[in-house]
Image (cartoon, grey):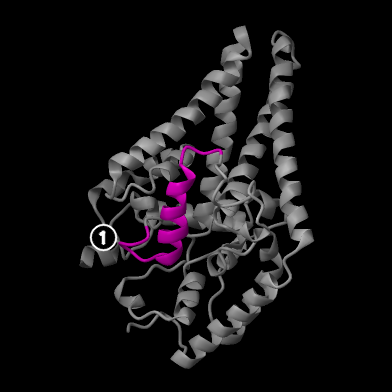
Amino acid sequence: MHTLPVSLTDDQIEAFGRELDAIQRDVKATLGASDRAYIQRVIAVQRSMALGGRLLIYASLPLLPTPLFLPVIGLGTASLGLAKILENMELGHNIIHGQWDWMQDPEIHSSTWEWDNVCPADQWKHSHNVVHHTWTNVIGKDRDVGYTILRVSDKQPWRPVYLAQPVYNAALAMMFQWGVGMHDLDGTDTLGKLRGIGRKAGKQLAKDYLLWPMLAGPWFLPVLLANLVANLMRNLWTYAIIFCGHFPAGAQVFTEQQIEGETRGRWYLRQILGSCNITGGRLFHVLSGNLSFQVEHHLFPDLPSNRYAEVAPKVEALCARFGIPYNKGSFRRQLGSTLRTIFRLALPTRRALAA
């Protein structure tokens, strides 16, 4: 078995894992009415913002020749974009993870929820819930390491194509839902998966860029552009939050050899070493889908996201007691660090040159 980069004995790592198990058990034992009310409230707010945003967009259209047009359609577009962010982050991602399956509510269940994204939920469950959360940051196994197109660690061999990665990183950010949509194309049943993506993407494109704009009649184009901007808002935000949780300085990647014979305690340790938190206020955490607590999400992926804030101080204190790095920083710091990594590793590094 190859060791991970911490100075702990096997017994200490397993003791660490047992304490994390206890934290998870304690939280799950207290799930109840307040948690149910939380997710129902988020759903109500998200749907109200989506409806209100669309109504404002349509209300702005008769104002088109006046100075009021831009503020009204801007407010409607922002509301719609925020609704899409909430739906993808705090609702879709977390519901599909099974975080709310304990309620046994058929409308808020991982088996029935289909999110506002071109990626079919069933494909996301495999590529994300199974592959990513099993093989977190393992090169050659976890397709989230650079989303298969970016070099995010100097352990990845450099190739000339990476010289352009700042450019296609920007394209990925703007079209992030499409990167997510293609994420499960791993060579197995490719045709079947493409059909599923095609069906889902067709519905999304028709909804945002045909049906809603057609309702505006002669004002088709402003509504189409408003939907385009709302989707761009969602794509850029989800890209930033997810990348800040995985690729800032200090986030570690692993080889298959390093995780041979991995125990539960070592799996926990890998999740912490490969994940990064983002500090911020309550609204920021909700808009991030509570993925600002990426460390806790990777430790307890099926724990309801509204509980990560109470769990994080316990996990951080436990890490400090065992001498395990706990990576956290402001949004500005984590995003800046991530972008610097992407730009730096576009060039051949010393390790790559030596290889």
In the rendered image, the quadrant that contains the C terminus is bottom left
Q: Residue at x 62, y 14 (%)?
A: 215
| Residue at the image position 59 percent from the left and 54 percent from the top | 94
Q: Residue at horizontal 43%, vertical 60%?
A: 130
Residue closest to the eye, 346 or 101: 101
The answer to whether residue 248 is above or below residue 270 is: above
Residue 54 vs residue 194: left or right?
Answer: right
| Position of residue 272 measured from the top left corner of the image (x, y, whole percent) | 51, 72
Question: Total of numbered circles in the picture?
Answer: 1
| Residue 339 percent location from the top left of the image | 47, 52
- The relative height of residue 101 versus residue 209 in the rendered view (above or below) is below
Residue at 24 percent of width and 49 percent of height: 160
Given residues 238 and 249, the one toward you in this image is 238
Q: Is residue 42 magenta?
A: no
Q: Residues within 10 Å of mark 1 (few under 14, many from 20)?
A: some
Helix, strand or loop for disc 1: loop
Asked if the stretch drawn in magenta spans residue 132, the answer is yes
Q: For the N terminus, give its image quadrant.
A: bottom left
- 322 with respect to 130 (left or right): right
| Residue beneath disc 1 | 157
Magenta residue span: 116-142
Q: Position of residue 172 (x, y in %)?
A: 43, 41
Residue toward you, 307 or 56: 307
